Image (cartoon, rainbow, N blue to C red):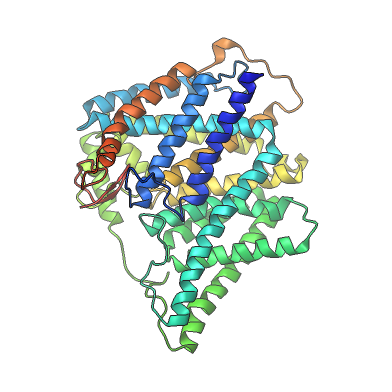
Amino acid sequence: MTRVSASTAWQWLIVAVFIGLISVSPSLNLTPSSLIVTSFHDSQRLLELLLIALVLLNSLAFRNKKSYFLVNQTVSYALYGVIALAISTSYLAHSPRHALLEISLFAGLSYLTIFVARLYHENNTLFITRLSDILWAGILLCMVSFYVGYLTATIFKTPLTWPAPFHGFSNIRSFNQYQLWTLGLITLPLLTFDFKNAQTRRYLHLGLVAWWVLLFYSASRGALFAWALGIFITASIYKKSAWPFIRLQLMHMTAGFLSYEILFQLIPYLRSTVLVTGTILRDSTSNRIALWQHSLSLIQEHPVFGIGPMHFAWLSQTSAHPHNSVLQVMAEWGLPAALIILTIAGYGVACWLKRFNAHNLQAETKLNRHLAIVLFFTLTTCAAYSLVDGVIVMPISQVMMFTLIGLMMGFYRDRQFSGAEVKVEANKMVWFKPIFAGVVLLTLAWSAFPEISQSASGSEKRFSMGYSATGPRIWLELK
């Protein structure tokens, strides 16, 4: 009985840190005063590391002997191959410690997927409800900050220097990542919940429109293109089953654009003031093409083992990552590891579509039907955005990504074993084992400690890693 209570208390602690990262840290800096961190990015990274450490300790202390989740044997061998290649490329990298830091970070996040999947399995409806509440809490905090800034600028006729008043992220594109991870999931209450009070539905609609205003204000062409592509692919696969979700998206997007025009074009015109200095129709360009070309050169020079995880930052003078997830993995991990990772991802999507296609969803409950569509849309949209931005780099985005994967795993397994008794043989347990969790935890602590210790000691340059590029990777490197 004590063990059960301790396990439950530990789960609540993990959930509390998750809420702090996803809901609170985009608006408030939660860093301990002893570290004196002024960067939201570094504060969020510390929370992510704490979350991963707690999840790994949970796996060590409260092992579930009757594991509900299995991994295909072929996939498990492929994962072993990725681990072997990752260790090899780390050994050959310029800074093995920093390469191992990124590897252990992603390995720890993989345990988060299992943790999320198990929480979903324990009570799926409650889990979806609470996750929606967590996301809405974070969104409301962001919108309060934004619209207070807007009202202040409007009343006092003080132009906003774009991209102000966003302040919770090191880059406004990181905020766009946060938006894309949430846009689909926060519509689930409107699609699936029966509200006794119609006013609640109106508030949710209003909140979604206000959230879209922020997307248009942030002027992200890549985010809108990724959203449109996600809508198109989802509509093509799920057809009529996806229409209730797509209708909501189109309705809120349209109302959001009109509201943006009123708030940032019409009202400033009537008050004879310029309120915003940048729009989504700007003609400026970025250096992404140059970064992609540099990535291709690195792939040609280091095709087998790559340059080492996280090492694009050491070989680029401009950006710490190439703003393209596929090129990043190929350049840093090598082509063999990238091929295995992409094959596993493709296999996972194929399994998902085989089980959750337009025909099979007709037999599902309303919640499960909409959840399957929303999860697929979110994964597709963020995967598309990762081809033009650092979706797999930023701390909140990383946690959201593996949370979504864990949710999809839990949903998939629940449908697979629905109504059947699950029996798991010990020899089928693969690499998600406590002993591996211990290795990952020790590696993560060893590789992350020097920068954290440096900050705690009061050094002038916080979390300095010594690479040549400007901007965030693990920490926010300031030049």
Find residue 225 and report its horizontal and vertical position in percent. 47, 59
Q: How many marks?
A: 0
Image vertical order of residue 179 relative to residue 15, above or below: below
User: Does residue 395 appear to the left or right of 476 in the view shown?
Assistant: right
Give the residue at x 38% y 78%: 159
Foreground: 170 or 285? 170
Foreground: 61 or 89? 61
User: Does residue 455 appear to the left or right of 169 in the view shown?
Assistant: left
The residue lying furthest to the front in this view is 34
User: Does residue 40 appear to the left or right of 353 in the view shown?
Assistant: left
Find residue 168 and report its horizontal and vertical position in percent. 42, 56
Q: Quadrant of residue 404?
A: top right
Give the residue at x 19% y 41%: 466
Q: The N terminus appears in which quarter of the rendering?
A: top right
Give the residue at x 37% y 42%: 326
Residue 5 seen from this side = yes
Give the residue at x 51% y 69%: 147
User: Does residue 376 appear to the left or right of 150 in the view shown?
Assistant: right
Find residue 315 and report its horizontal and vertical position in percent. 20, 43
Residue 343 seen from this side = no
Q: Quadrant of residue 309?
A: top left
Foreground: 96 or 84? 96
Find residue 41 and report its horizontal and vertical position in percent. 37, 49
Foreground: 342 or 386? 386
